[in-house]
Amino acid sequence: MDALTRILGGMMDLTPPVDPLGEALHFLRMSGMFYCRSELTEPWGIELPAMKGSVMFHVIVTGQCWLATEGAEDQLLQPGTFALVPHGEGHRLTHERGGATRRLEELPEELMSERYSVLRHGGGGAPTTLICGAVWLDHPAARHLVSMLPRLIRVDPSDSPRTDWLQSTLRFMAAEAKELRPGGETVITRLADVLVVQALREWIAQDSSARTGWLGALQDPEVGRALALIHREPTQPWTVASLASRVAMSRSAFSARFTKLVGEPPMHYLARWRMYVAHDSLKDERPGLGELAARMGYQSEAAFSRAFKRFMGVSPGAVRKSGPVSPLSRA
């Protein structure tokens, strides 16, 4: 039995990660969310402020509107459209293209709970109903992924047969937002999580720019497997040779291909990813710096602290003292 266990264990160890890109999307878990049901009548226009560190979205329930953001073409959003502003940039929503706007903070909102409000605005004409939200992604790897996205992503019902999910999810979200029942905030937060990830999946499937850089590397058969190994087991004593062996490539060919696709050498990427993991641990677990340094493969706390600050821009002590970030404090 022991021999069989060893054989099976070896077979399992050799099984390659199935979906490196899917595993990377796992890091898009949300640390917080604020959402608003907007009941608008023509003429109307809203200027939304930038929300640093957030991913903002709009769901069109009824009516239509124009979305304008710097560096992207104005977009006409209609019922069933899901629009994502990944970088938290300020933008404008109007009933007509180029219409006048008022700043969001000037408009009356009815706060229904700590994370949910209802906004009513306009001149009494044709109605439009939106669900707007801002979500915060606290994991550094998530911010790394989001930094590669375009300024605007939109998914329409007609984009592909796969967007049936969009309509059913949007209807569910609209129903929950219309009459907030017990547990409704949790449901809407989970639905927003699904919508954001699904919108990114649709963009990755359709946009050629998603097949370059880090996202493209995740979809490469060999480099993607190596990245997934690093993501799954960042504390392992990986070397270029051991990673190359696991993906059945020579050391030199693997190193060259990894560097070309990812944009940095394997060991540099591994070190940076370990700092991402350490950042997350400091926020959630609050381990001692010596313990964390040893876990990340550093011989001393000082060496770990220098590496952490080089990659993350702040000291590990500062991250640990700050504790979990309150999403609402970032708006």
Image (tube, grey):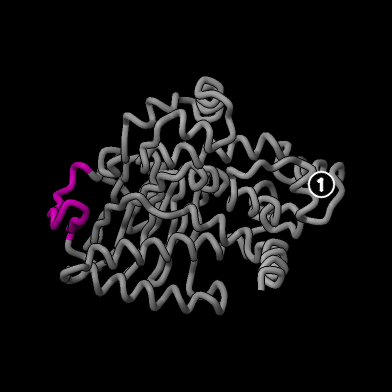
Residue 230 appears at what percent x and percent y? 63, 48
Q: Quadrant of the C terminus?
A: top left
Judge whether 252 appears above or below 177 on screen: above
In the image, 129: left or right of 5? left
Q: Nearer the viewer, residue 288 or 7?
A: 7
Q: How many marks?
A: 1
Does 24 sit above or below residue 306? Answer: below
Q: Position of residue 40 (x, y in %)?
A: 23, 61
Q: Quadrant of residue 21?
A: bottom right
Q: Nearer the viewer, residue 52 or 289?
A: 289
Confirm whether the magenta stretch covers residue 9. no
Q: Secondary structure at mark 1?
A: helix
* The stretch drawn in magenta includes residue 116: yes
User: Is residue 62 among what the camera can see?
Assistant: no
Residue drawn at point x = 18 percent, y = 47 percent:
107
> Quadrant of residue 248 in the image?
bottom right
Q: Which residues are magenta?
A: 105-123
Q: Nearer the viewer, residue 230 or 61?
A: 230
How many C-alpha atoms fall within 10 Å of the one at disc 1: few (<14), some, or many (≥20)? many
For the stretch drawn in magenta, the main secondary structure is strand
> Residue at position x 53%, y 57% from top?
25
Is residue 276 placed above or below 79 in the rendered structure? above
Task: For the N terminus, give its image quadrant.
Answer: bottom right
Residue under circle 1? Answer: 254
Q: Is residue 104 visible?
A: yes
